[in-house]
Image (cartoon, rainbow, N blue to C red):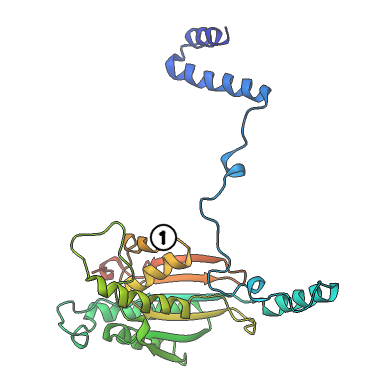
C-alpha cells in the first residue's frame, strides 16, 4: 500500500522513475528507523582491516618496560615504578625527515662515476636547496647516499643551508627494495638483487625512520638526499602500507618528501615528491 501511494505521488508530481527510487529510499529508511534496524554511519561502526602497529619501530615504551616478575605478586609501588619508567622512556619531540631525490643525471653512464648530474640536475638541486632555506628550519644534519648523483646534489643543497653537519652512507644507495606489485615488464632485476638490496634498504629504513629518543627535547629536522626507490619504499613502510606498492608512486628529481614521526609512534606524510617550487620547464622524473 505504501509503495502504491509513493508511486502515485511521483506520477502526480511528474517525478518519474528517479523520483520513485528516491521516495522509496526515504520510505524504507523511515520504516527501518521505526523498527530500530538502521545502522549508524559507516564511519562509526567501521572496523579497520589492518590496525596501526604502535611498536613498528620497536621503540614503544609500553613494550620496552616490563614489570619485574622475579618476585611473586605486584605491589602498588611496583606499578608506580613501571609507570615512572614508561614515562621516562616516552619521547616528547617529533622527528621531521625531509627526503630529497637527487637531481637529473646522465643515465647513459656505464659506472656510478659517469652518472653525474646534468646541467638541469644541478639547477634542480639549487632550487631544492633554496626551498629548504626558505622553509627556515634548524636542520640538524644533511645525510646523503654515497652515489655520485646524490653526493653532487647534497653538495649543491649544502650551499643554501651552510653549517649543517654532513654525513654520507652506503646503505642509502639506490637499489631494488622488494619485488613490486604489480610488476612491470621493462624492469626485472635478478632475484638475488632484491635479496641484497632489500636487506640493505630495510636496514636503512630502521636506522633513519623511527621516533625520537627520550633525551631529545625539541623537534628535529633532518635532510636526507638519496634515491627514488629508497624514498618510495620508506614511505610505504613508514605509513604501514604494503611495501610492494612502492613502484606505484612517482617522484620528480629534486623533490621533497616530508615524513613526520611523532612521539606516540604515529607517522604523517606531510608532502610526497613536492616540486612545486620549481618552474614547470625545470621539472623532470627520468
Closer to the camera, 282 or 247?
247
| Vertical comparison of 280 with 208: above or below | above
User: How far across and down, in percent of the image, does residue 120 sit?
Assistant: 24, 77
Q: Could you tell me which residue is drawn at 75 percent across and 75 percent down?
A: 82
Q: Could you tell me which residue is drawn at 42 percent across and 67 percent down?
A: 235
Q: Residues within 10 Å of mark 1 (few under 14, many from 20)?
A: few
Residue 197, image quadrant? bottom left
| Vertical comparison of 165 with 79: above or below | below
Q: Which quadrant does the N terminus fall into?
A: top right
User: How far across and down, in percent of the image, does residue 223 sit?
Assistant: 44, 81
User: How far across and down, in percent of the image, does residue 228 sit?
Assistant: 32, 72
Q: Position of 48 compared to 169: left or right?
A: right
Residue beneath disc 1:
242
| Vertical comparison of 228 with 15: above or below | below
Closer to the camera, 228 or 45?
45
Q: Position of 284 compared to 273: left or right?
A: left
Q: Could you tell me which residue is drawn at 35 percent across and 64 percent down?
A: 246
Q: Is residue 109 visible?
A: yes
Residue 128, image quadrant? bottom left
Closer to the camera, 151 or 211?
211
Amino acid at each position: 500500500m505504501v509503495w502504491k501511494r509513493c508511486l502515485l505521488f511521483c506520477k502526480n508530481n511528474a517525478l518519474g522513475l528517479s523520483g520513485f527510487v528516491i521516495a522509496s529510499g526515504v520510505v524504507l529508511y523511515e520504516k527501518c528507523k521505526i523498527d530500530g534496524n538502521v545502522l549508524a554511519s559507516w564511519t562509526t561502526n567501521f572496523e579497520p582491516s589492518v590496525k596501526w602497529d604502535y611498536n613498528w619501530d620497536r621503540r614503544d615504551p609500553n613494550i620496552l618496560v616490563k614489570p619485574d616478575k622475579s618476585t611473586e605478586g605486584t605491589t602498588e609501588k611496583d606499578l608506580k615504578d613501571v609507570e615512572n619508567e614508561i614515562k621516562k622512556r616516552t619521547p616528547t619531540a617529533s622527528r621531521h625527515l625531509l627526503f630529497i631525490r637527487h637531481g637529473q643525471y646522465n643515465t647513459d653512464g656505464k659506472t656510478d662515476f659517469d652518472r653525474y648530474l646534468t646541467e638541469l640536475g644541478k639547477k634542480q638541486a639549487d632550487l631544492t636547496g633554496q626551498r629548504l632555506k626558505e622553509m627556515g628550519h634548524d636542520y640538524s644534519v644533511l645525510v646523503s647516499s654515497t652515489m655520485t648523483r646524490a653526493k653532487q646534489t647534497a653538495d649543491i643543497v649544502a650551499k643554501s643551508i651552510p653549517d649543517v653537519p654532513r654525513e654520507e652512507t652506503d646503505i642509502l644507495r639506490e637499489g631494488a627494495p622488494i619485488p613490486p606489485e604489480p610488476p612491470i615488464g621493462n624492469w626485472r632485476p635478478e632475484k638475488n638483487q632484491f635479496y641484497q638490496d632489500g636487506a640493505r634498504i630495510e636496514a636503512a629504513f630502521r636506522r633513519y625512520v623511527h621516533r625520537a629518543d627520550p633525551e631529545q627535547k625539541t623537534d628535529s629536522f633532518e635532510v636526507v638526499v638519496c634515491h627514488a626507490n629508497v624514498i618510495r619504499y620508506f614511505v610505504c613502510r613508514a605509513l604501514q602500507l604494503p611495501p610492494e606498492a612502492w613502484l606505484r608512486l612517482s617522484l620528480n628529481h629534486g623533490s621533497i618528501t616530508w615524513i613526520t614521526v611523532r612521539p606516540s609512534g604515529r607517522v604523517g606524510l606531510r608532502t610526497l615528491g613536492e616540486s612545486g617550487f620549481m618552474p614547470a620547464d625545470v621539472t623532470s622524473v627520468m
